[in-house]
Structures are given as structure tokens and as C-alpha cells.
Image (cartoon, helix red, strand yellow):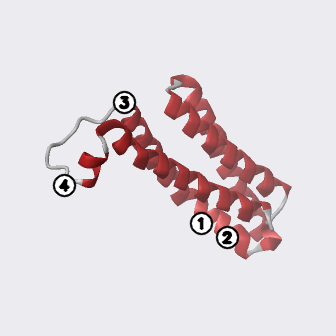
Amino acid sequence: MSTELLVLFYLGVMTFVLVFIQGMQVPLNFGFKWGLGNRDEPREPTAFMGRIARTIDNQIQALTMAVPVLAALILFPEAQSSTTQTGAWLLLFGRLGFAVSYLVGIPYLRSLIWGVGLFGWMMLSYGFIVAML
């Protein structure tokens, strides 16, 4: 299995875990009765609920950029290289670090970690473009 395919799988698992954490917030904070009901009386989300929602939004945005490049590399294995493998790991660890730092509320370091993921995406894209020339 290629590194790029493995990273794509891990990004999917990470997204599932984030959505699962978000889903658990309603029963933990508002109870099962309200969560399973019609939710006619709105409840104010907690700060953590807001952070998890924003983290998921950011994850989905990142996936819209990452999935096409990773898919292209998976479909054209001759474009895979040490550059794309390193980029894939940087993307994954940057996304994971970003999610954790956002959820625990680390403000400035979070943006730096986000940049690591972006740099990984740039490495993936660069490696693919160079291989296709």
C-alpha cells in the first residue's frame, strides 16, 4: 500500500473521529431526551461544541484540497516519490496537530501547525506536477 493511500485512509478515519466526538456532545451536554427529541427548544452550544464544529468545517475544507491530489497520486503511482511521501505525512500530522490544538484551545501554535499541513499539501502537489511534466 502506498503512503499516499495510507494517509488518505487516516484522514478519513480522523474525520470520522471528529464527527463522532461532535455527535457525543449533545447527549453529554443536553441529555439523550433532548437530543433524541424534536429539539424544539434551542440550546446554546458550549464553547467546545463550537470548536469541534469549526474543526470539522476546517477538516472538510482541507479534504477538498487534499483528496484530489492524493487520488491523482494513487491513480498514477509513477508520480509517487519521496517528496510526495514526505508531503503526505506532513499533511496528516499537520491536520492531526491542528485538530488537537483547536479542540484544546491553543490559539497561535494552532496556526503554525495548520501551516505544516498546508506545506505537506504543497509538497504533494509539487511532486505530482513535476512527475507529470
Quadrant in which the C terminus is drawn: bottom right
Judged from the image, the secondary structure of the residue bearing numbered disc 3 is helix
Judged from the image, the secondary structure of the residue bearing numbered disc 4 is loop
Q: Which mark is residue 47?
A: 3
Q: Is residue 16 above or below residue 109?
A: below
- Using a 10 Å C-alpha cutoff, classify the residue at mark 3 as few (fewer than 14 neighbours), some (14 to 19) or many (20 or more): few
Identify which amino acid the numbered label 1 is placed on: Pro
The quadrant where residue 48 appears: top left
Judged from the image, the secondary structure of the residue bearing numbered disc 1 is helix
Identify which amino acid the numbered label 4 is placed on: Asn
Which of label 1 and label 4 is nearer to you? Answer: 4
Q: Position of residue 43 (x, y in %)?
A: 22, 38
**Where does label 2 land, which residue?**
72
Q: Is residue 64 above or below residue 96?
A: below
Which residue is depicted at the point 59% across and 26% down?
109
CA–CA distance in space, label 1 to label 3: 33 Å
CA–CA distance in space, label 3 to label 2: 38 Å
Q: Are marks 3 and 4 in contact (CB under 8 Å)?
A: no
Q: Are marks 3 and 2 in contact (CB under 8 Å)?
A: no
Identify which amino acid the numbered label 2 is placed on: Ala
Which of label 3 and label 4 is nearer to you? Answer: 4
Mark 1 or mark 3: whose residue is earlier in sequence: 3
**Where does label 1 land, which residue?**
68
**Where does label 4 land, which residue?**
38
CA–CA distance in space, label 1 to label 4: 38 Å
Q: Are marks 1 and 2 in contact (CB under 8 Å)?
A: yes
Which residue is depicted at the point 47% across and 42% down?
55
- Using a 10 Å C-alpha cutoff, classify the residue at mark 1 as few (fewer than 14 neighbours), some (14 to 19) or many (20 or more): few
